[in-house]
Image: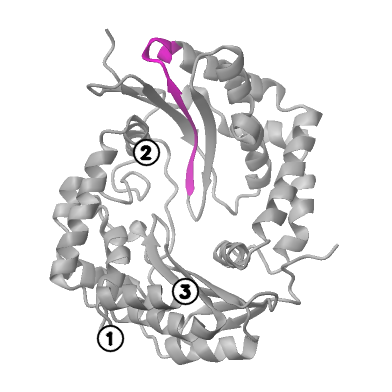
Amino acid sequence: MTHPITPENVTRVEFSNGITALFKENFTNASISLRGRLRAGAMYETDALAGLASFTAVALQRGTQKYSFQKLNELYDNAGMSFGVSAGTETASFGGKALTEDFEALLEIAAQALLQPTFPKPEIEKLRGQIITGLREAQDDTRYVAWTKFEELAFPVGHPYHRPSDGTEATVKRLTRAKLAEFHNKYFRPEGAIFVIVGDIPTPKAIDLIAKYFGGWKGKKNLPFAIPDAPFAARALRRDIPMAGKIQTDVVLGYPGIKRNDRAFYALRTADLIFGQLGLSGRLGEIVRDRMGLCYYAYSALNAGIGAGAWAIGTGVNPRNVDAAIEAIGVEIQRLRAEGVTADELAHAQDYLTGSLALRLETNDGVAATLADMELYDLGMDYIVRYADLFRGVTREQILEAVDKYARLEEAVIVTAGPAPA
């Protein structure tokens, strides 16, 4: 079997300033993708300044020492290229695409945005207004409110997962231009940075371009890059949030999860797929929605990253069915813990996992994103060669062991957001 990513066809280079760069040639079409990760996520914020990493990341493109915001947009439009920066809890991410002849121009823009932003005051205030408008709209969304409150209750005060990475209206109002510049100066740095270039460019040339635009980048070193383990803040906790004018209730329930590099990851990922993902959301969709008619949708989500996020279930229900839906989901969780999964379910999930990877690796962008993840989580350059065996090797016994440990309804945090009970 030929693999699109192998140790032989990917070049990995460590630069002296701390950047690790991965290069993969693909000369089948005249375009190149750039992807990257930086250790500049919301884990470095405080609760009082939630949203700082996200605001900083987006603001990088609002003006640089060489280009105004308007000029950057002109450059993108004229060359048909794209570039963006964003930040989540663990990392800041950047990415872009360009035709082969425009790729050096894209890298130069990336260097300007990442290394030399100016945070022009008028643009920062405009951006703040847009962020606050988005947050106000989100506060009227039952699903957003339920998930945000779930994470707040599930993780203790001060923990990176406790606060929303996009912040709140109150915290975003506190984020001065000076704070954005200070966050950028301290955390946007080459140490631990990951750059990935995939496409129509010879590897030696791509290496030279990274050295040209980022080889002289300097920044703070030896800053910790870790998410602390956190027991859930409370046991079997339920919170109901009344929201006026709503006709649907969103429910989120969950428990402690695992890190991406936990040895149980492959078993729990497979269980999650079977329980609340496959088809129209796995068993939850088939039983709680289709057979029992208790919800509009239901799904599960395993948040496994640098830190151990929650394994959580989300569902949208008629307000009259809230308690019945929660009870039905509880029954399915208990059945999963008692019986595990069937041989047919496991085979179907394994087929899906291996098939969907092939689809993801059909584009330069998909390959670049996968390589960035492989480097971030230290999965090894032979990860794609081993991928099918990692999931095909998951047994029903391993799944039973994983769900017995992690599907603990007795420790679930449950949040509902919707109309107040009549």
Q: Vertical placement of 375 versus 238: above or below?
A: below
Rounded to the nearest angstrom, the CA distance separating label 2 from label 1 is 40 Å
- Between residue 28 and residue 303, name the one nearer to us: 28
Q: Of all residues shown, which one is farthest toward the top?
A: 422
User: Any mark on residue 66, and which?
Assistant: 1
- Residue mark closest to the camera, 1 vs 3: 1
Residue beneath the point at 57% across and 76% down: 32
Q: Mark 2, mark 1: which one is toward the viewer?
A: 1
Q: Nearer the viewer, residue 202 or 263?
A: 202
In primary-sequence order, the first of circles 3 and 2 is: 2
Nearer-the-camera pick, 362 or 163: 362
Q: Amino acid at mark 1?
A: Lys
**Is residue 197 at all visible to an observer of this figure?**
no
Quadrant containing the N terminus is bottom right
Name above or below for residue 277 compared with residue 8: above
Q: Element at badge 1?
A: loop
* x, y percent for residue 19: 49, 79
Residue type, numbered disc 3 = Ala
Residue displayed at 29% across by 39% down: 138
Question: Residue 216 sits in which quadrant?
Answer: bottom left
Q: Please tell me the numbered disc located at residue 193.
A: 3
Q: Residues within 10 Å of mark 1 (few under 14, many from 20)?
A: few
Distance from disc 1 to disc 3, alpha carbons, whole Å, reads 23 Å
Residue, x 63% and y 90% (percent of image)?
204
Of the numbered discs 2 and 1, the one sitting upstream in the chain is 1
Residue density around tag 3, few if under 14, some if 14–19, many if 20 or more, within 10 Å: many
Disc 2 to disc 1: CB gap under 8 Å: no
State the extent of the magenta-drawn residues as a range: 308-323
| Residue 7 percent location from the top left of the image | 73, 73
Residue 151's disc number? 2
Residue 314: in magenta span? yes
Number of marks = 3
